[in-house]
Amino acid sequence: MLNGEYPSATAGNLHELMFNYKNDNFSCSIQIDDVDGYFIETLSQKDEHTQVERDTLIENLRLSEGIIFFFPYQRLFDEKSIKEFNYEIDTIISKLKSMYDDRSSIPIPVAIAISKWDNSPHYQKENELEEALAYINNHKFLRLAKEKIEVNFKYVKIVPISAIGNDIKKLNPYNLKVPIEFFLEETYKNWVEKINKLENDKEKLLNFLSKINFDMKSYDNGKYDKLYKSLEKEYAQKLLKELERLKSIQEYKDFEKKYKSIINSLLPKNIEAILKVKKQLSRTQKVKRFSGLTLMAIIIISILAWNADKLLIKNESELFADIVTNYNNNNYEDAQDNIEDYLSEYADGNTINLEHKQKILTFKSQIDETLKKREREKRVTEVLSEAQKIVVDKNFYNIDRIDEIFTSMNEMGIDDKKLKTELLEVKDRLATKENYSEFKDKLESKSFSEALSFVQTDWQERYGKDKKIAVGLILNKLLNRKVKELLEDISDIVDVDAYNNLDKTLKNIKDLQENTGIEKVNYKATLNDENKNRLEDILREYRKYSDALKNGIVPKQIAFGAESKDNEPLGFECSSEYQIILNIDIKTYHYDNNDVCDNIKMSWRNSQNFSEHSYSVKVIEEDLVENDEYSSSFSLNKNDLIKLVNHETIKKDIGKSYYIEISN
């Protein structure tokens, strides 16, 4: 860095950085996944060379307790970079949305870090956060990215940072710890909230505490560490006593099922040898009851059992007989367990009887299909039972649950027309006047575009005329906010997306008024005089822009530049031979010394109407060894025409070091 050299950027792959972090409140180890934009852009691709890294990153995203998006300060972005920037953010949001069942707000804390802040004149000033926000808001694509993040994530913090500070020699990083501490604080608050909710369910609480992945000792003077150890000790004693009474593999399975949520995390840590009991019990018809069983006794018995394997293990024929008996008696769950034991013991090719193994595989297929059918029948029964309860429950109020029941019935092919009709009657009852307040609350909580859709899909005549007026007033209120947002989005130059957004919104308003019959929504009436005048100016510019796209544009000048292959000035005759086929006189110049034909001024010979089209160009180079007549073409697209409306110059590359410049 002292020599003006910076570390190279992360290549197109995943880097895992490990840190130990400690402050007055927290002590933990942290893994940071460092990825560049290209890796994110290709996250959905299949590539055998980097697939493991992609899968790792997606899994780490699911487990993450914080994400940092870097918004660089004073970096110039071209259109391609902006698209890539937005695509990267969209990719991460999309992946997380799918992991969190498309929840409206992803519960992972996010930091928007404005990097290289040491380049700002507001570095380490009192108002630097306000200036950092202003920097984002002054760059539309950064502002839109910020808003997208704020909409999709529950916890967002904006912080200006610098990796090196404003003096490389001293190397004084600035605010780098802020995102980390923000993540830890939000994660800790979520943990405490979850712990409080599980206070009365000790088994779930123990399971949750065992999965927390960094040191709890320093939290609240070790409060939760003590709680965890207390619960762990209590359950260890409880499990030991239960294990003392086990006499068969079935009893062990019942025990394992009962404590499934904590057995894997608790037993290996405290009484690992007890897990061998399962293997021993699974190989015996019956074992004697061990009275006063202790940890040491289990270890000794387990070791003895291993040494006496031939006495305790069922042979292949006995295991097969158990499978057949349970299968014939329709004890499919027991038969399934027997099959798992059999295949586990003889999966390595040491099967004593190949005919037995083939029959077992047939049994397994039939059992799996039967149990799957039973599970479906059980689910159908549960759905029908809940639907019938909803129909008779006068206090039922969850209209969304009715929709979920309908979806389940359709997916399962349940065609009970009478029950479905009764459910619809309940839904209609819930949507009557006494539930208008709920509808009103939902409506007021939505954005304007969401509100339009909500009214169009959920509106019925059932609310009465007075409610129509009320809904119209709510929409006017939301519209006032929406139009102001649209005005803020539209800059002084032509902004196609913003104009189209405004145009679409105004059409939606008109459709809404025609289709619902609610109180008229007047978008102009919601604006003050200043915004009303600004809107008129914007619409006037928009019409000008629309006419230009429709009818074409007449630029005021066009220039043609050329550079020779040997990087030497070319001699030009300013004659008609150099005319573009569009009937335009040519001004020519060289990149380095700007040689210009003096005897011809830039002008239109005939007014030329430019529209979206492909145009031809012909050039003759007389100073080359052989005269080289070169023809090419260039096209104008919609964005070019928009730039011309905004009085910008466009440059079109026509090859061989030639280009055309057009301005209006």
Image (tube, rainbow, N blue to C red):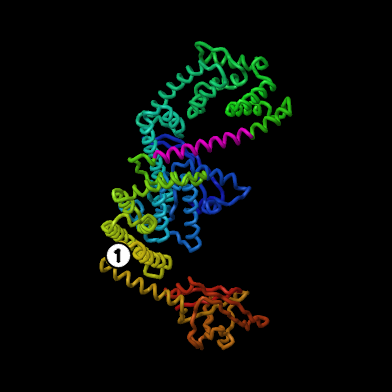
Give the left or right position of residue 361, taking residue 580 as reference: right
**Does 81 sit above or below residue 274?**
below
**Residue at the (63%, 82%) spot, across then down:** 623
Q: Main secondary structure of the magenta part?
A: helix
The mark total stands at: 1
Horizontal and vertical percent for residue 197? 37, 33
- The quadrant in which residue 489 appears is bottom left
Give the left or right position of residue 431, taking residue 296 as reference: left
- The quadrant in which residue 625 appears is bottom right
**Residue at the (37%, 61%) spot, across then down:** 138
Task: From the viewer's side, name the closer residue of 497 and 408.
Answer: 408
User: Quick check: can you spot residue 173?
Assistant: no
The amino acid type found where label 1 is placed reads Lys
Give the left or right position of residue 93, taking residue 654 as reference: left
**Does 513 sit above or below residue 267?**
below
Examine the structure image and report whether residue 537 is included in the region drawn in magenta.
no
**Residue at the (51%, 14%) spot, across then down:** 294
Examine the structure image and report whether residue 385 is included in the region drawn in magenta.
yes
Horizontal and vertical percent for residue 113? 41, 50
Which residue occupies the extreme front position in the image? Answer: 418
Task: From the viewer's side, name the closer residue of 189 and 71.
Answer: 189
Residue tagged 1: 520
Give the left or right position of residue 577, taking residue 215 as reference: right
Q: Secondary structure at mark 1?
A: loop
Q: Which segment is the magenta one?
A: 366-389
Task: From the viewer's side, name the closer residue of 128 and 617.
Answer: 617
**Residue at the (52%, 85%) spot, across then down:** 584
Q: Quadrant of the C terminus?
A: bottom left
